[in-house]
Amino acid sequence: MVTIRSLAAVACAITAMGCARQSPSATPTPSSPPSSATASASTTAEPATSKPLSTRCHTADLSLALQDAGAAAGTSYKWVVLTNSSGPTCTLFGYPGVSLVDASGALLGKPAERNPVHAPQVVTLHPGESGYATVGFPNAGNFSPGTCTAESASMRVYPPDELRSLLTTVHEAYCPGFSVSVITATKQ
């Protein structure tokens, strides 16, 4: 049976323009589950240019490692290495969230600032492949006493668009200028 509600959902899905609900009669009530026509229309009408959300790498799909990446201009660098350890191919896009924490998990300073040195790109990770982001740790000796925090116990890393994090041991002080680049397919 076709209802006004299912027709409105199909029209919204076809236009893919985030249709606003315009009348209370078009809004389903919590006691009435959506019809099968509504559910199928909203899941199949994605614009052709958007990638399916199911291919995005989730925190549970990834493992985390750090690798030294050198130093320059009073800053030491480490590679954040996110590896697809789950099996299915998945993608990463954008900046990871990175912060330093103490032994109790409390944040030291502020999360890493985004360094726009590279443009964001979709990085496809087949099983066992890795994506890389550079984290910059300014040298605490270049700052006045009290500007930087004590050394961290760990670094917390949130893969792009994820709410769960990964944790790895790192002993660095938070100083202004702590930064992270976008995920790239190679060490850049």
Image (cartoon, rainbow, N blue to C red):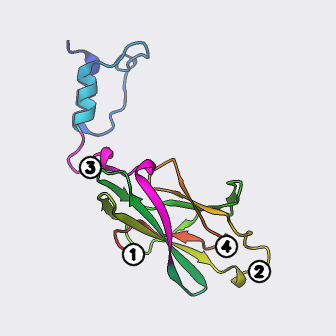
Mark earlier in primary sequence (4, 1):
4
Per the image, the residue denoted by label 4 is 175
Query: Residue 74: image x %, image y %?
Result: 61, 85
C-alpha span from label 4 to label 2:
10 Å
**Looking at the image, which residue is at 52% across and 48% down?**
164
Mark earlier in primary sequence (2, 3):
3
Tally of numbered discs: 4
C-alpha span from label 2 to label 3:
48 Å
Per the image, the residue denoted by label 1 is 187
Q: Is residue 62 left or right of residue 140?
A: left
C-alpha span from label 1 to label 3:
27 Å
Mark number for residue 50? 3
Find the magenta span and give its range.
Answer: 46-68
**Looking at the image, which residue is at 55% across and 75% down?**
136
Residue 63 higher or lower than 10, as above or below: below
Amino acid on which disc 2 is placed: Ser
Closest to the camera, between mark 2 and mark 1, is 1
Q: Nearer the viewer, residue 54 or 13?
A: 54
